[in-house]
Structures are given as structure tokens and as C-alpha cells.
Amino acid sequence: MLNKLKGLIGIVSVVMLIYFVCSGNTLVAEDGENDAQERFAGATISVEASVVIVGLEALEEIAGELDGQNLNSIPLEKIMRSIREDEGGEMVSIVKLAVGNESDAEINTEERVDTKRKHPEEGAGVHENRQINISFRVTPKIIDMNRIAVSFDFKQIVSENTLASEREAEEQEDRVIQFEVSSELVLRPGQPRIVGATQKGEAIFLIMGVDI
């Protein structure tokens, strides 16, 4: 009977020890999060979203075969290089928001761009009209100095009208490209990343970055 009682006391002691250890870890995590919220209560977070379009042929040259490849897995540096080195990449739009910790912010923009150029070999004149409408809503929450949780909705509509003329002939092309991404994720300050991508005749990437 005494041995059974000792065994029961030992089991209870182990269970209580496990409980206190788990409870202690939980309290530490909660205290750490509370400390971060108190420390950054009045902080302003800068959030930037940009859209990059890369032609599929150009993308295959810098990232390899696309068959079965997740566009989100392509290294950001390769996407940015396609812009810097004029390898088929184009920065279509950039929007920035300054928002308080755990606050909501939204921006709606409209931009119209007209470009005229001449084909160097064929001599054809090309007039391109592009209208870009963007809606961007974001809610950031600072977890700690190195992590910021971000909930966002991003929508971009690009309307393009291209008129190419050569001698007496004219050719007009209209197209509308809609790109939407909604998500909740954790970003690191100063480390932008691809947060959404799609393929519609060309690859479209949404890149987001945050800073405190």
C-alpha cells in the first residue's frame, strides 16, 4: 500500500511539474507579446506594395522552365534584376502607406500614362494609353522588432489601349488586366518579398515590404 501511495505521489508531482513548465512558457510568450505591444503602441509602420510584370520568355531566361513551377517561389532578386538590366521586367505601380500599429489604412489611386514611340526597324508609330486603378487596404501588427503581421487586400486594374500605325494602316488593341491578392502573413522589416503572383499571358508579381 505504501509503495502504491509513493508511486501515485510521484505521478502527481510529474504532472504538476509539466503543468508549471507549460504554464511558464505560455506566460513568457504572452508577456513578450504584451511588452512588444506596449513598446510599439505609438509606432508608425511603413508599408509598400509594388506590381512587377515580366514577359514569360524573359522570365524563363532568368528563372528556368516555368512548367509546374510556383511563381511565388522565384527569388525576388531575379525579378528585380529583370527590371534593372532591362530583361523584360517592368515596374507597373508602387503604393505606400504609413499606418499605426494595429490600425487600418486604405488608399485608392488612379494613374494615366500616355506613351508614344516608333519601332526602330519597321518605322511604325505606336501610341499606348494606360490607366491604372489601385485599391490597397492594410492592417499591420508588430509582433517584435523583427516580425510584423500584416493583413491586406490589394486590387489593381490596368486598362490598356494600343494604337499602332504604319503608312495607311492602323491596328488597335485593347485589354484589361485585373490582379487581386488578399492574405495575412508575417513580414520582416527591410526584407521585401513576393506575396502574390499570377500568370495571364505574362507573369504578374505583387511585392510587399514593411519598416518601422
Image (cartoon, rainbow, N blue to C red):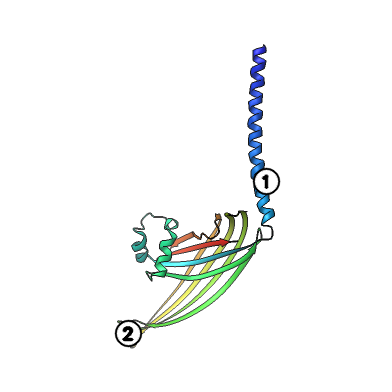
Image coordinates of residue 71 in percent, x first then y, are 42, 58
Residue at position x 53%, y 62% in the image: 209
Eyeballing the image, is 189 above or below 176?
above
Crowding at label 1, few (<14), some or many (≥20) Cα neighbours within 10 Å? few
The amino acid beneath tag 1 is Asp
Residue at position x 60%, y 69% in the image: 107
Secondary structure state at the residue bearing disc 2: loop
Residue at position x 68%, y 49% in the image: 34
Secondary structure state at the residue bearing disc 1: helix
Q: Which residue is mark 1?
A: 31
- In the rendered image, which quarter is residue 133 located in? bottom right
Q: Which residue is mark 2?
A: 123
- In the rendered image, which quarter is residue 2 located in? top right
Residue 121 or residue 156, whichever sits in front:
121
Contact? badges 2 and 1 (CB < 8 Å):
no
- Disc 2 versus disc 1: nearer the observer: 1
| Residue 200 appears anywhere in the view | no
Residue at position x 44%, y 67% in the image: 53
Which residue is outermost to the bottom?
168
Which residue is outermost to the top?
1
Image quadrant in which the N terminus is located: top right
Side (left or right) of 155 relative to 119: right
First reached walking from the N terminus: tag 2 or tag 1: 1
Eyeballing the image, is 163 above or below 69?
below
Image coordinates of residue 124 in percent, x first then y, are 34, 84
Image coordinates of residue 26 in percent, x first then y, are 65, 41
Q: Which mark is residue 127?
A: none
The amino acid beneath tag 2 is Gly
Residue 179 or residue 6, whichever sits in front:
6
Image coordinates of residue 212 in percent, x first then y, are 60, 61
Eyeballing the image, is 92 above or below 181?
below
